[in-house]
Amino acid sequence: MKKQTLNFRTLAFAIIALVTVAFATPAVANNNNEEKPVQLTFIGNLNNQPVYKLDLNNLQEAEYSIVIKDAAGEVLYTEKVKGTNISRKFQLNTAEVEENDLRFEVVNRKSNAVSIYEISKSISTVQDLSINKIK
């Protein structure tokens, strides 16, 4: 009798383990660098001036042109860079340049692929009111 109980427990445990493993979903790691070869992010403010980070996530060496323009289309900054996994930080002087409408253009010189990011800033005031019943 003791041997049958032990075999039943072992069999039940094996079935539970098999079902758990069979219906488990595998975790798949995504490499975001492959999905977004060019990425522009707002980092924050330094001395009340906005700072942006531009990442060029390329695995093979390539040459890029980076151009920053204002709303009127005037070129504020231009640079040619070459390499792999290039990263640049840009701090804009808002006393000289209006930050409201900026345009970052990145051109891959080999494939002529163009990535354009437009920055527009708006300020709004939000007021929330909440009423909760205590008793």
Image: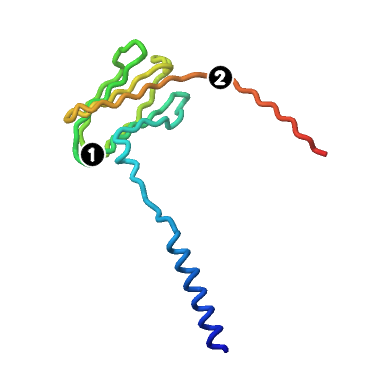
x 38%, y 29%: residue: 52
Closer to us: 76 or 9: 9
Closer to us: 12 or 99: 12
**Which amino acid, mark 2?**
Ser
Query: Which residue is the site of mark 1?
Result: 84
Q: From the viewer's perspective, is residue 72 above or below residue 51?
A: above
**Which amino acid, mark 1?**
Thr
x 48%, y 71%: residue: 15
Tell me the quadrant of the picture where the C terminus can be found: top right
Q: Under tag 1, what secondary structure?
A: loop
Q: Is residue 41 left or right of residue 7?
A: left
x 30%, y 12%: residue: 74
Q: Quadrant of residue 67?
A: top left
How packed mark 1 is, by other alpha carbons closer than 10 Å (few <14, some 14-19, many 20 or more), is some
Query: Which residue is the site of mark 2?
Result: 124
How packed mark 2 is, by other alpha carbons closer than 10 Å (few <14, some 14-19, many 20 or more), is few
> How far across and down, in percent of the image, does residue 129 sit?
69, 26
